[in-house]
């Protein structure tokens, strides 16, 4: 009888241990249960972590709140790593996104993080080149190392580029609240990312400089249809306490609404420009330290430090000739153009569609049209090579 009781006690302790284990990658891997396109691993207390059964999972996905009666509270370590998903909606039952949860997802463009989430693991969105912006709610208090906006770094090994185990930053706009972990993350990763605040800290100063009322003085109706601020921090000496070096202001009025357009500005193709009297509505550059405001063109002309990052890293435009979209113009772009012409490769998202050209005759339709003759051909590759050689 004592042996039976002892065995029962041992089984009880073992089962109890299963119900309270920490959500380690090893344990989750050992306790996967497939359920359609997803698998889950029990975490105890009726909760579970979730991942994708196959790396072929694609398209926009909605992660379920429950599977087999378990509440999904965590995106598992590497749960959707390497999948082909283009968008993901995460339910408000989830409180944590695990390490590398959505890493190496080349097609991921949209990730909807709910206010229930409190932490993002290490490398959560690493190597997601299509993810240009993401909103991080203020409920998130912990963001892991290189969680957002990074890719593998490589070294040249006898002509072959191989990963060296390190990280390299890529441009991304992180949207969140002032004073949140999202803003602290951006400030700590100085000079690589933009932070778009869901507050309007400088709105009073901006409207005063523009001499524009927020409301129509005659009937009190809203005159300003849209306003947002996108912060840019650069100085490493002022991490976590920085005043932005500049703020990208986006604004337009009820009278005219936005006019989607594109134009060539220096080496960049500017998107979504919108200019109307009495002020330059559309993109504006505000300098908090001096209380000055400029049109984007004027700021570019004045060569305000870091202003070129507005185009590629804030999602306003594209670097002309950057056909591999690594935000650099180099010999790789010329090579890719040559391969595309020979039918050996493709240039994705080459055409900027859905925009009007302010100067249709002189502005290129294609990112690859480096010599601006409105054609993509070997001359563009040659023009890039000459430009890089200083010729």
Image (tube, rainbow, N blue to C red):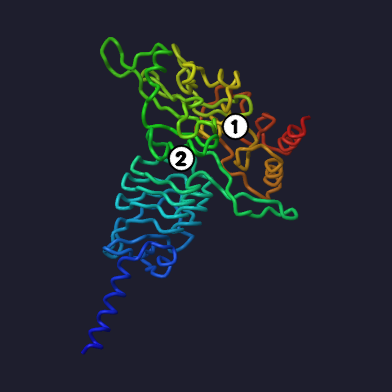
Where is residue 179, by image quadrant? top left
Quarter of the image with the C terminus is: top right
**Numbered disc 2: secondary structure:** helix
Which residue lies most toward the left here?
1
Q: Position of residue 185 (x, y in %)?
A: 46, 40
Of the two numbered discs 1 and 2 on the same chain, state the one appearing first in sequence. Answer: 2
Q: Which residue is drawn at the image coordinates 68% and 29% (left, top)?
A: 373
**Numbered disc 1: secondary structure:** loop
Q: Mark 2 points at which residue?
A: 185
Q: Residue 347 carries which label?
A: none
Q: Which mark is residue 365?
A: 1
Report the front residue among 325 and 48. Answer: 48
**Residue 322 drawn above or below residue 160:** above
Which residue lies most toward the front here?
2
Where is residue 52, by image quadrant? bottom left
Is 257 on the left or on the right of 292, as rendered? left
Q: Which residue is drawn at the image coordinates 50% and 22% (left, top)?
A: 285
């Amino acid at each position: 009888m004592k042996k039976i009781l002892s065995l029962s006690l041992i089984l009880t302790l073992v089962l109890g241990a299963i119900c309270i284990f920490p959500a380690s990658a090893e344990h989750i891997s050992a306790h996967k249960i497939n359920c359609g396109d997803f698998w889950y691993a029990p975490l105890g207390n009726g909760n579970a972590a979730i991942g994708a059964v196959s790396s072929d999972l694609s398209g926009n996905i909605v992660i379920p709140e429950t599977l087999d009666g378990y509440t999904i509270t965590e995106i598992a370590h590497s749960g959707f790593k390497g999948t082909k998903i283009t968008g993901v909606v995460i339910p408000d039952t989830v409180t944590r996104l695990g390490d590398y949860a959505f890493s190496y997802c080349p097609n991921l463009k949209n990730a909807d993080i709910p206010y229930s989430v409190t932490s993002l693991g290490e490398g959560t969105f690493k190597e997601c080149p299509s993810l240009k912006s993401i909103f991080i709610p203020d409920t998130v208090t912990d963001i892991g190392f290189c969680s957002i906006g990074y890719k593998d770094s490589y070294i040249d090994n006898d002509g072959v580029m191989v990963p060296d185990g390190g990280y390299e930053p890529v441009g991304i706009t992180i949207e969140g609240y002032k004073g949140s972990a999202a803003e602290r993350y951006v400030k700590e990763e100085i000079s690589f990312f933009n932070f778009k605040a869901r507050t309007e800290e400088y709105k009073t100063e901006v409207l005063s400089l523009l001499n524009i009322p927020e409301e129509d003085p005659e009937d009190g109706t809203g005159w300003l249809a849209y306003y947002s601020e996108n912060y840019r921090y650069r100085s490493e000496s002022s991490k976590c306490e920085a005043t932005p070096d500049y703020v990208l202001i986006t604004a337009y009025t009820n009278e005219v609404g936005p006019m989607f357009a594109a134009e060539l500005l220096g080496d960049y193709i500017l998107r979504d420009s919108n200019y109307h009297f009495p002020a330059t509505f559309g993109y504006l550059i505000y300098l908090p330290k001096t209380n000055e405001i400029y049109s984007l063109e004027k700021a570019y002309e004045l060569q305000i430090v870091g202003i070129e990052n507005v185009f590629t890293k804030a999602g306003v435009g594209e670097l002309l000739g950057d056909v591999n979209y690594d935000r650099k113009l180099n010999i790789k772009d010329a090579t890719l153009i040559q391969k595309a012409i020979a039918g050996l490769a493709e240039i994705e998202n080459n055409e900027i569609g859905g925009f009007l050209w302010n100067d249709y005759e002189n502005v290129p339709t294609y990112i690859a049209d480096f010599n601006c003759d409105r054609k993509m051909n070997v001359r563009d590759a040659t023009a890039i090579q000459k430009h890089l050689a200083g010729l």
